Image (cartoon, coloured by chain):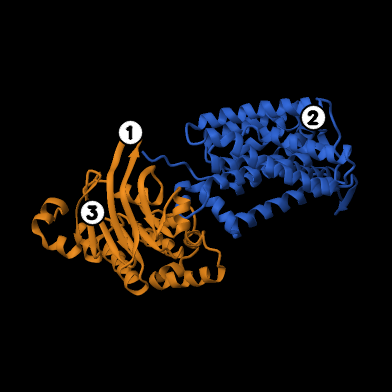
Amino acid sequence: MLPLAAFADFMQQIVSGLASGGIYAALALALVIIHRSTGVINFAQGEMATLCTYIAWTLTVNHGWSYWPAFVVTLAFSFLFGVGTHRVVIRPVEGGNVLRIVIVTIGLLIAVNGFVTWQWSGEQRQLESPFPSNTIDVGGVAISVQDIGTIAVTIGIVVLLWGLFRFTKVGLALRAAAVNPAEARLVGVRVTWMLALGWGLAATLGAVAGMLTAPSVGLDPNMMAPILIYAFAAAVLGGIDSPLGAVVGGLLLGVLLNVVSYLSQYHGFGWFTEELRLPLALGIILVVLLVKPSGLFGHAEVKRV
Amino acid sequence: MRTLLELDALEAHYGPVQALRGVSLTVGEGEVVAVLGANGAGKTTTLRAISGTVARSGVIDFDGKTLRGGPEAAARAGIAHVPEGRGTFVELTVNENLRLGAYTRRERQRVKADVKRVAEYFPWMAERGSQRAGTLSGGEQQMLALGRALMSRPRLLLLDEPSLGLAPLVVREFFRIVRELNAKEGLTVLVVEQDARIALSVSSRAYVLEVGRVALAGTSDQLQDDESVRRSYLGY
């Protein structure tokens, strides 16, 4: 049995793991949405999120907006930014070798990163958090309100998205366009707009992830780079074509990383420090790809010859 | 009979390969017309050119207006194309497939009523609405593709080789329903078939294509009764 204090500490780690896992899940979900519709990993997903987070920062700090209006406007901006990115940058290279799209997303990563640094400088900024920084006591375990807020926001957007895809006409059209674009056009779905819409939703998810990340780690142009790696790991773990997998993968990864860190302190492998979290995530990507490439919830890819 | 669809000197290319070399045909409102011919004669391409899935030139007149644009535009004009090889969304459920069929329609209540109407033709669809289309048998998928097309309340139904890969019994059932739809609801159908015998049994007129041109046209009875035509063009 763990001593009580250690148990409380352990539970805190689980909760904060769920919070950071929720952020990975949001970004992983963005990757999955684009992968399902466009067939590639959007390497610029993290940088796009960073840019949107700077919009929120500009609105709150430079223009004195309060947090939630800035949050909503940032989401609206990010949606349009995603749609525009698809229309202007991605659509022209669609329909050929997918490698071309991959290269364009890498170019986009560099371009957006450069633009953000030029516009807002590389200096670290502080984005306020919408949640108070105190903790509340849940059965003897002190849990941070920040963590609870982050988890709540993640659950909120996942439920919203699920409802959109599951119950609305446009959600159905989005899925149809992703799984069978030729067929979708035959029933009258405007597929290129559905793809653009997917990019818009993905960018919005990214913006949420960015705004939830910034208060704790500080906003700078490279803020989302490690988060994107975690999101890759989460998406691969859950199955790159599975939205449910992205969410479960994100939460699992968040908890796993925290538990490993925690155990390393108490069980004699203190050499496992913060710096090894990223390599661990990359190790997970590698192991999943080798052992079960379709991930926990994905469908094994069937190639017709 | 009023002409619903008129093709005039329709041409289509796949890259450098010319698949249609000037096809002209008409379909009257409420008529079932068959397009027959050997593999590679241009049957499938004719339907694809009508729905705009392949680049084309020439004139397509639909309901008195020139048809332009891609398949989205054709769908909005009231053309439902059931492509070769079923054409269902295998990853989506039966109900979702039906709902997608009505994608271009706005009247929610009538769409709901139409789900019931379709279920009268295919009772199993009502019971298995949440089943994934990919887990249906080939025959059921073909029926679902037809049901989905009906959900759009089409002015014109394009059927591409519905008999392909299906058991004879299923093929007969499929065409029985097509005949019933035509008789009861006045549905206009342009059907492409390899199986000339079954296609001629439901159609009133037929065109025989040969290397991208209309080689022969006539009423289905004429074509069926002419033995030399049957032997040289229809293969039975």
Q: Nearer the viewer, residue A49 or A241?
A: A49
- SS under mark 1: loop
Determine the colour of chain B.
orange
The reply to whether the C-beta atoms of the residues labelled 1 and 3 are less than 8 Å apart is: no
Residue at which label 2 appears:
A220
Q: Which mark is residue A239?
A: none
Which tag, 1 or 3, sits closer to the chain's start? 1
Q: Badge 1 sits on which subunit?
A: B
Q: Residue A217: x and y, percent?
A: 81, 34
Give me the residue at 51% from left, 62% from top: B99
Rendered location of residue A190, percent (x, y) = 53, 49
The answer for how far apart the CA atoms under marks 3 and 2 are is: 66 Å
What amino acid does circle 2 point to? Asp
The quadrant of the image that shows the C terminus of chain A is top left
Disc nearest the viewer among 3 and 2: 3
Task: Using the rendered image of the protein, determine whether residue A273 is visible from the camera's viewpoint.
Answer: no
Q: Which residue is mark 3?
A: B36
Check the image and report above or below for B212 versus A225.
below
In three-dimensional space, the C-alpha distance between marks 1 and 2, rounded to whole angstroms, equals: 53 Å
Q: Which residue is mark 1?
A: B16
Q: Quadrant of residue B212?
A: top left
Using the image as rendered, state which of residue B8 and residue B117 is in the foreground: B8
Q: Are marks 1 and 2 in contact (CB under 8 Å)?
A: no
Q: Position of residue B229 (x, y in %)?
A: 12, 55
Instruction: Specify the colour of chain A.
Output: blue
Q: Give the chain of mark 2.
A: A
Which one is in front in this view, the residue at disc 1 or the one at disc 2?
A: 1
